[in-house]
Amino acid sequence: MPKYFMPTTLLSGKNCIKRHPRHLLHGKKCMIITGKQSAVVSGALGDVTDVLKENNVEYDIYNKITNETGITEIYNLARSMKDDGVEYIIGIGGGSTLDAAKAAAVYAANDIEPMEIFDEKYANKPLTVVCVPTTAGTGSDTTQYVMMTLDDPRKKRSFSSEVCFPYATYLDARYTMTLPVEVTRNTAVDALCHAVESYLNVQASPFSDTVALEAIRLIGQCDAALVAGKFSEADREKLLVAASSGGMAVAHTGLNVVHAMGHQITCTKNVPHGRANGALLVEFIAWCAKADIMRAVDVITAFGSDLSSLKRFMNRVAPMDCEVTEKDIDEWIDNSITDGIAMNCPGTFTHDDERKIYYNALVNKDRKYNVW
Ligand SMILES: [Fe+2]
């Protein structure tokens, strides 16, 4: 029987923080975790602190989170929060920041060593986390997943626990209006990959399908804006809702091989996460069509396109401008990390399939698709 568990309260729309302040209030002392700029520039930090001041909540701000913030830094931050009697956390920013907030919440509530967070078993419930995303991509604000950066070797590792869903998330598209075009494109493509990988997934259910297809549809409605690099407030709202919907979808199905394969491109070629995944997406859909043509067509129809048009869209919005050789592909296959996640594929996924997807996506770029 399909299960759907999503305990995060979503507040959305213009001024949602000021219209629904009570979801921001969970004690007398709070830690705001942010990156260096976006929380201030977007106006989100000001809106949050206004509510905290009006309600006499004491707060500190930790504004040093980046994509590369390591696990020890987050652990030490959580230790100091514990000493200072911090009762809850508000994360304002992109995926790395929201993930840092979710991890700090676990450390601050539990006497564990840094690496024990990956055991995914905690004696105490994490501190309450409220998320205010300022990007529209990762969906961290609606999932139980947390991605962290290990210190040595410096690589990514994730954990997952149902206690790590945020308590509440505020989705105000105004906070994404100042996002640079390239970040907007990369994060939108990432969100599209989340939704497609969830829909073309043996773990999919009617509940995850609903949010996955809506995310694909909303991003498809923004295709012209993404190509032009010009976004209205309505476009920004659609992309933000799509990103959180994509998160809700993968929270229930898990990701698929696109993310596992894209990770190798990101690590070896320094290609942004969304762009690396996007480069593989059309080939993944074409591969899935062999196992389940109807669901592959559902994806393309929801986006409002055909496979060749989707490929052209990807080439314009998320072009792969680095050289990839067959030797690179050989190394990625040797280091393949798809084995565990391939069980989510609608069909048996072999290293040969993996090789074909890499090759057709990154080397044989002029490949033509059937009309659908
Ligand atoms: Fe992603």
Image (cartoon, rainbow, N blue to C red):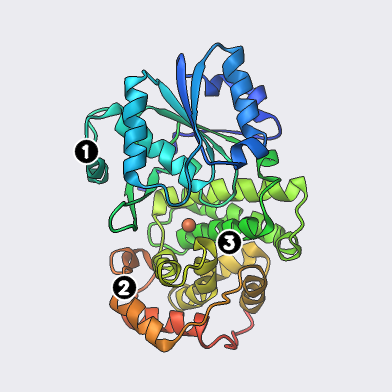
Mark 3 lies on residue: 189
| Secondary structure state at the residue bearing disc 3 | helix
The quarter of the rendered structure image containing the C terminus is: bottom right
Q: What residue appears at the point 42 percent right and 24 percent down from the top-left corner?
A: 88
Mark 1 lies on residue: 113
CA–CA distance between discs 2 and 3? Answer: 23 Å
- What amino acid type is highlighted by mark number 2? Ser
- Note whether residue 307 is visible: yes
Where residue 75 appears, as percent x and y from the top left, is: 32, 37
Q: Is residue 20 above or below residue 236?
A: above
Cβ–Cβ below 8 Å for labels 1 and 3?
Answer: no
Name the residue nearer the viewer: 187 or 93. Answer: 93
Name the residue nearer the viewer: 52 or 225. Answer: 52
| Secondary structure state at the residue bearing disc 2 | loop
Q: What residue appears at the point 48 percent right and 40 percent down from the top-left corner?
A: 64
Q: Which of marks 2 and 3 is nearer the N terminus?
A: 3
Q: How crowded is mark 2: few (under 14 residues within 10 Å), some or many (20 or more)?
A: some
Q: Residues within 10 Å of mark 1 (few under 14, many from 20)?
A: few
Mark 2 lies on residue: 336
Taking 116 as reference, is 327 left or right?
Answer: right
Name the residue nearer the viewer: 363 or 286. Answer: 363
- What amino acid type is highlighted by mark number 1? Glu
Q: Which of marks 1 and 3 is nearer the N terminus?
A: 1
Mark 3, ligand 1, within 8 Å: the answer is no
Most extreme residue toward the top is 56
Q: What residue appears at the point 53 percent right and 41 percent down from the top-left corner?
A: 35
> Of discs 1 and 2, which sits in the foreground?
1
CA–CA distance between discs 1 and 3? Answer: 35 Å
Taking 44 as reference, is 202 left or right?
Answer: left
Cβ–Cβ below 8 Å for labels 2 and 3?
Answer: no
Where residue 10 appears, as percent x and y from the top left, is: 55, 34
- Note whether residue 142 is visible: no
